[in-house]
Image (spheres, grey):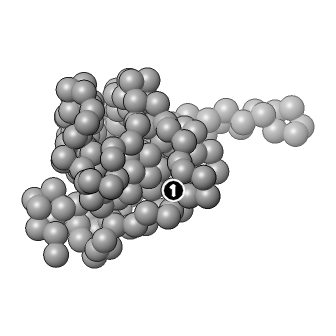
Amino acid sequence: MVFKIRHVALLASTAMLAACGGSDADTVELPYGTAQQLMANEVQPTADIYWGAVKFESILNDDGTVTERDIRPETDEDWATVEASAVHMGELGAVMLTPAYADGRGDDWSDFAQGLIDVSARAAQAAADHDPDAVFEVGGTMYNVCRACHQMYPPEELPEGMTVEDVQRPNNDETLEEYVAGDQT
């Protein structure tokens, strides 16, 4: 599947959104901005869709009672959204392997990116199978892959006055598949 990249607004807490130190933006074109911007604008919102698809909530009400909700995709469209988010995560892992993001980083960067690709394939299969238990379990594994990368490549500060939205892809109509294949026009 080929999914068009949509620009997603930055969530309030950028500290949890960003991972990974930066590349030298002066020598390598960064089509999705810095690694931090890629994480904040693409990876985190996509992961949130997957992670939010299957969960259990206990909410303490003002009257002292507890409301419990078991959240799961209910329709084929819901499941397709979960599967699409997993596929998109794998595509983003492939972007992380490109020279624009991998050059200047250790071999572990490529290992983390490949780990994201691999776990995303499992996540997509869990969603395709409409298996909420597998979606939940694989979501935990995906979180661990992300967390391990964040520990090795912590967020860096953006230059003064710059926000995550300041760097855009040169071609917003380009799909990830086109970028990864090198067909940038």
Q: Amino acid at mark 1?
A: Val
Q: Is residue 87 left or right of residue 62?
A: left
Given residues 151 and 27, the one toward you in this image is 27
Vertical relation: 109 (above or below) 18: above
Vertical relation: 83 (above or below) 63: below
- Where the C terminus falls, by quadrant? bottom left
Q: Is residue 72 left or right of residue 179?
A: right
The image position of residue 84, as x and y in percent, is 29, 55
Residue occupied by mark 1: 164
Neighbour class for label 1 at 10 Å: few (<14), some, many (≥20)? some
- Where the N terminus falls, by quadrant? bottom left
| Residue 57 in sight in this render | yes
Q: State the residue at coordinates (50%, 38%).
A: 156
| Residue 79 in sight in this render | no
Q: State the residue at coordinates (27%, 33%).
A: 105
Q: State the residue at coordinates (46%, 30%).
A: 154
Q: Quadrant of residue 32?
A: bottom left
Given residues 30 and 151, the one toward you in this image is 30
Vertical relation: 31 (above or below) 21: below
User: How many numbered marks does the figure carry?
Assistant: 1
The image position of residue 74, as x and y in percent, is 42, 53
Please, what secondary structure does the residue beneath circle 1 have?
A: helix
The image position of residue 57, as x and y in percent, is 61, 35
The image position of residue 65, as x and y in percent, is 81, 33
Given residues 168 and 104, the one toward you in this image is 104
